[in-house]
Image (cartoon, grey):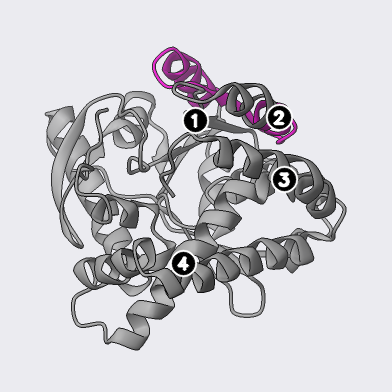
């Protein structure tokens, strides 16, 4: 969730990054995720009494998924708070995540599509939306031995002293422990291309998160709640390297908290214009992603764009 810097925010950071972090990282992963979700539900309950942000989130859920009744909108509002806490703080869980306990929190379907592409000597681009805890699939696939690289955005711009020297510093330390290379957009693109040509796997987000400075070429597409400006980078990476572009979707599991679904590679359109081909492949992915967002808007980080009037679907500030 979008927040502003303040002494109260800094105090909360100290609580989160010291006592809470030390508790969560000592719990089994499933219990750690459950605790983070519970904190989100508690925040939602407190916020719901005051209206404000909680009420705006309920309305936003109705904008993204018209036809939801008030009870379902409230459920999705609570899910948005849960998603925020789980996504932002799941990095505390990752140190306890192993190959053996990973199935207790994350089921993976469609690994055969990933394995087949790699066995054929192709790299794989896994576009994934800002939906749920976005780094969990990266950590899990890295633990399974896949050669993972993520194009990720992490910045301390605009943070307070405590934000920079506590939250940002420690987050960098924890991200370095994820079994994957994490490279910045822009300069990291060359490394991602080399990684794909060597038969690696690149995971990158297929939509811009709230407050994220966009990078690379974007195009506008129809999407739940309005037009969405989405990056063409994942498709362009695949086209430039001959890698498979396999849609990846995170969602709730049947018997575990989360499930990652990896789909078969998208077909490359039979057109010579690579820009047009990249747009067509991006549109194909977004049509599949849109159905998931419309079904569970509370899991989508982009719900925040409908809460704050000054925000747009393609944030450039």
Q: Is residue 220 above or below residue 81?
A: above
Q: Is residue 225 left or right of residue 28?
A: left
Name which of mark 4 and mark 3 comes first in the sequence: 3
Rounded to the nearest angstrom, the CA distance separating label 3 from label 1 is: 26 Å
Q: Nearer the viewer, residue 297 or 11?
A: 11
Quadrant location of the C terminus in the rendered image: top left
Q: Which mark is residue 170?
A: 2
Residue shown at the point (49%, 63%) measured from the top left: 81
Q: Which residues are magenta?
A: 170-198
Tell me residue 292's x, y (percent). Answer: 35, 67
Name which of mark 1 and mark 4 comes first in the sequence: 4
Image quarter of residue 195: top right
Q: Name the residue carrying label 4.
A: 47
Tell me residue 59's x, y (percent). Answer: 25, 70
Q: Name the residue carrying label 3.
A: 15
- Indicate the secondary structure of the residue bearing disc 2: helix
Discs 1/2, front: 2
Rounded to the nearest angstrom, the CA distance separating label 4 from label 3 is: 19 Å
Q: Name the residue carrying label 1.
A: 152
Q: Is residue 130 magenta?
A: no
């Amino acid at each position: 969730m979008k927040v502003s810097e303040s002494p109260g925010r800094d105090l909360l950071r100290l609580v989160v990054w010291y006592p809470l972090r030390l508790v969560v990282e000592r719990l089994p992963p499933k219990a750690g995720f459950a605790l983070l979700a519970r904190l989100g539900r508690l925040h939602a309950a407190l916020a719901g009494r005051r209206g404000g942000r909680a009420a705006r989130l309920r309305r936003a859920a109705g904008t993204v998924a018209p036809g939801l009744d008030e009870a379902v909108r409230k459920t999705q509002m609570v899910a948005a708070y849960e998603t925020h806490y789980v996504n932002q703080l799941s990095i505390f869980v990752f140190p306890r995540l192993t190959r053996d306990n990973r199935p207790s929190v994350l089921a993976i379907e469609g690994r055969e599509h990933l394995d087949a592409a790699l066995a054929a000597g192709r790299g794989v681009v896994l576009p994934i939306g800002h939906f749920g805890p976005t780094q969990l699939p990266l950590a899990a696939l890295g633990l399974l031995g896949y050669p993972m690289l993520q194009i990720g955005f992490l910045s301390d711009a605009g943070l307070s002293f405590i934000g920079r020297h506590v939250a940002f510093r420690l987050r960098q330390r924890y991200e370095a422990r994820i079994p994957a290379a994490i490279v910045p957009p822009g300069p990291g693109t060359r490394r991602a291309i080399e990684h794909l040509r060597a038969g690696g796997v690149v995971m990158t987000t297929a939509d811009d998160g709230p407050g994220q400075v966009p990078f690379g070429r974007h195009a506008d597409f129809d999407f739940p709640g309005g037009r969405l400006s989405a990056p063409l980078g994942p498709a362009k990476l695949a086209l430039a390297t001959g890698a498979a572009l396999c849609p990846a979707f995170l969602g709730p599991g049947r018997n575990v908290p989360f499930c990652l679904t990896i789909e078969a590679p998208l077909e490359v359109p039979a057109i010579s214009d690579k820009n047009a081909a990249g747009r067509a492949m991006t549109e194909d992915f977004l049509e599949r992603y849109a159905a998931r967002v419309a079904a569970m808007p509370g899991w989508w980080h982009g719900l925040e764009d409908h809460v704050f009037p000054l925000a747009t679907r393609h944030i450039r500030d």
